[in-house]
Structures are given as structure tokens and as C-alpha cells.
Amino acid sequence: MRPLARLCGVVLLLCSPLALAEESTRSDALRQLVDSYAERRGFNGTVLVAREGKVLLHAAYGQANVAWSVPNRTDGRYRIGSLTKPLVATLTLQLVQQGKLGLDRTLGDYLPELYAGTPSASVTVAQLLSHTSGLADVPGRYTDDWWQTAARRRYAPMDFAREWILPVQREPPGQQWRYNNNGFFLLGVLIERVTGQTLARNLQERIFTPAGMTSSGLLTDATVVEHLADGYARTPEGALVHPQWIDPSVSFAAAGIYTTAEDLYRFDQALYGDVLLHPQTRALMLKVHAAAYGLGWNVETWTLADGSTLPVASHTGSVPGYQSYYLRAEPHQDTVIILDNFWQGALVVAMGKDLMEALNGMPVPLAKRSLDDLLTPIAYGQGLEAMVRTYEDLGARVDEYDYSERALNALGYKFLRADRKDAAVRVLKWAAERYPDSANAHDSLGEAYRASGQLDASRNSYTAALKLDPDSPSARAALAEMDRATPR
């Protein structure tokens, strides 16, 4: 990114005092919103927000290294996890433009030694890009044993593909959208195969250098990266810890890039011209191909406060210790970039959506404190009843916290996934009491009751959900399954 004075100078000369005042007001509002996430939700990372080529907010919060009390900085580097995918998709489509890859060519064509004559031979490059390949994937949850064992080894890309991207189909190619890291890993292998160069060199020569990205690269376990923020995670009790180790070679083209907010903004701006892609190729990349997904991007249409619509392309990224979110909307060249090194997934996504909506005139309240942050450490450290007392005794502080149905539902399911069934029931009961007209709240409570063995209470909750939403497939299926298992 050019120095901000140069980037904005010509525009400033042409702007009226009123326009400048409006821009200043917008920047102040965006900063207040992010400040509220930092102060009340503990956001830790770097954020950049821009419109029409002008940076409105670029700020860093929290710590890059907790042990040494080193603050995060606006030029700090972060691992971006699956936010790697839009950059790899752009690189892939460059090679398509140049005739080195074909969207309709297949794994059997490019990697015959692995896939020719197998059920995966007909998987196309387009299907890899759009997550419709049908390939079996690595486990989706980092708690799976695979991430504790196989993912700690170092692999050459072809060795990883040979061992872990087997010609096994979960469904036939092209039939179903299913997020697939293995598909993007294979795109990296194809890029290396058709160019005769490493993925790292291709990224440098074809993406980073043309876009002016001077602080980005593909991480290896031997890389010493200056100003790379250390990644952290939290235990259920709330203690800050180092995240589990995964060898960077496993991330590769699916999740292996590190970068800065500035560099991602340079990439964003380079997409508007023809430096990286022809306009028609970019349009193809950002067109929905399956299930609100383009080629390497989530593609959505948002409804704004005035009833107008906004096309938004985005992608999240998550690798242990780091979370990222990048949103772009082309009508006003809106950009929101969030890089986080405390692995704050739900927080980062909520903040990114709030910033994009605020940028486009939606009324967005300041962030509230998290019941998850408050109650989860108490539930694990002091027990269920202490958690309940804390919730019930908030008193005058109650308005400081996010009691939305979404927040309560997410906390309840967090406890349910952790096999804390009693805590899940309590939280989801609170949700049903606060939102008695929500079929989803009763449905979720029914699932928690069922998991804890309280079948009569589960039936009552599912019945309440059906009264509110007679078409609810989950409630109807759950009741039918319980009746078959224990006929009354």
C-alpha cells in the first residue's frame, strides 16, 4: 500500500468540506465500534477498513507476544489460515488465463500417477476451486487425533497428496458443495506441476510482487518471520496458552500464507485492475458456482437498511492461534480486513460483519460483553451452580452483556460439544425462556435435553418448536426417532 498521504491526496483536493466531515465522522464511528470490541470482548489483532481507495481505519490492539508484553502493530504479520484460498484461487485463474491450466481439465490429466483410472480421475480444476470435488477431506475438527499425530509431520506436497488425498469420493464430482481443504492443497500441487516452480515462488512472482505485497509469504517450519505475531489459544477455563503445533507443510495451498493487513489491502486493490486478473476472469471468480461460493470465495448478497442490496465477497481463515476475516464489496470498493492472534473466531466474524454493515449505513450497536467469556471459566473452574449464580446475580450489569438468541445458542452448543450436558441444558433453557416465540430456541433445548437423557423434557421442547414452526424438519425427525426408540 502506498503511503496514506499519497493514496488520499488527490481525492482530498477534490472533496468538499462536507464530504471530508462525513468521512471523518464515518472513521470515528468505525473506530468506536472496534474499540468496543477491544474493550468489552478482548479483540487482539489488527484491523483495516477502506472505501473507494481511502483507508478509513487502520489500527492494532492487544499483544503480539504476551510473555514479553510486545504490542501488536499495524504492520504486524499474521498467519491467515484459509484466507490463503482466495489468493491461491487468483493464482490458479492466472494460470487458466495463460493456458497453463484448464478449468475443465481433470486430476487424471494433471496427476495421472495418483488419480488416473480412479473414482477421482474426473475431478476438474473448477470443482477443486468451488468445493464441489466430492473428495474425502482431512478431519474438520482440530480435536481429531489426526491433527495430533499425522499433522505434526513435515511433508513434500506430492508425498502429502499420495498419503492423505486418496482417490476416495464422498460423493460424485460436481454433485454437492462441501468445504474441502484437500481440494485446495491439490491446487497447489497442480500449480507446481504445470509451472515447474514451487508454490511459494509462484505466489511471490505472480501475486505478491505484482500487487506490491512486500510482507507476505508461504510459511515453512524453518522460516523466521520478522514481526510475526505469536498465536495463542485459551483453555475452557480461560487461561491463555500456546496453540497445538501443526507443521506448516500440512497447510500449504489450503492455509499456509502469512501476511499483513496492509498487504491484503494491496491485494484487494490490485483485483480491481488487470494487474492480477482480467476483469472477466475476476467476475467468473466472484460468481456463485455452488452454495453461495464462487471460485475460492464466499459470495453473498446482503440487504441494507434502505432495502438495497450489497454483493459481498469474503473469506475467513483459521489455523491454531490465528483467525482472519476479509470482506470486500465492489460498488464502493469497500474493504474490511481483520487479523487476529488470539484465535477469536466468533468475535472476528461478528466484528467483520458489523464493520461492513456500518460502512454501508446500517445501524450497528457497540459490542457488548460476552457471556461465554464470563460464564465458561466459572463453569469449568467452580462448577455449574456457580455459573448459574453468576448469571442470575448480574443485576445492574445485565445490559453490558450480549443476551441475543444467537449468543446463548452458541454458548449452549459449545457446552454440548464439550460433553457438558447439564451446562448446555441450563444455557439453552435460558434462551428458550428469553425467546419463547423462537422455534429454534426450543429445538436447541430439545436437543440438549435429549443428549442428557431427559427424554420427556426433550419431547416437550421439540413439541413446542413444532407448534411455532410446523415445518421444522429437525424437531419432527427427533420426535420420530425417540418414538421409534421408546414407543409410548
Image (cartoon, rainbow, N blue to C red):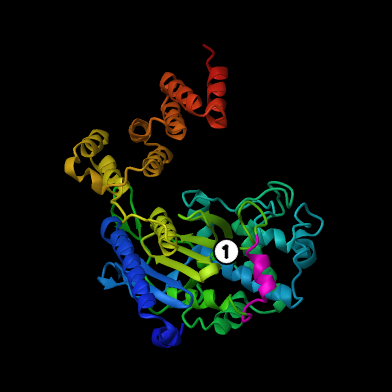
Q: Is residue 198 magenta?
A: no
Magenta span: 274-287
Give the residue type at disc 1: Ala
**Vertical placement of residue 261 versus 288, above or below:** below
* Horizontal arrangement in the rendering, residue 461 relative to residue 399 (left or right): right
Query: In the figure, residue 474 lies in which quadrant?
Result: top right
Q: Residue at x 70, y 50 (%)?
A: 168
Q: Is residue 49 above or below residue 287?
A: below
- Residue at (18, 37) in percent of width and height: 393
Where does the image place residue 155, in percent across and percent down from the top left?
58, 66
Callout 1 secondary element: helix
Which residue lies under the disc numbered 1? Answer: 254
Looking at this rendering, what residue extends furthest in the right direction? Answer: 117
Q: Hey, which quadrant is residue 69 in on the image?
A: bottom left
- The vertical placement of 24 against 327, above or below, is below
Horizontally, residue 100 falls left or right of residue 238, namely: right
Q: How many marks?
A: 1
Tell me if mark 1 has few (under 14), some (14-19) or many (20+) residues whose alpha carbon lies within 10 angstroms of its own: many
Q: Is residue 209 left or right of residue 443?
A: right
Instruction: List x then y, in percent, for residue 19.
Output: 39, 76
281 within the magenta span: yes
The answer, for residue 158, to whether it is visible in the render is: no
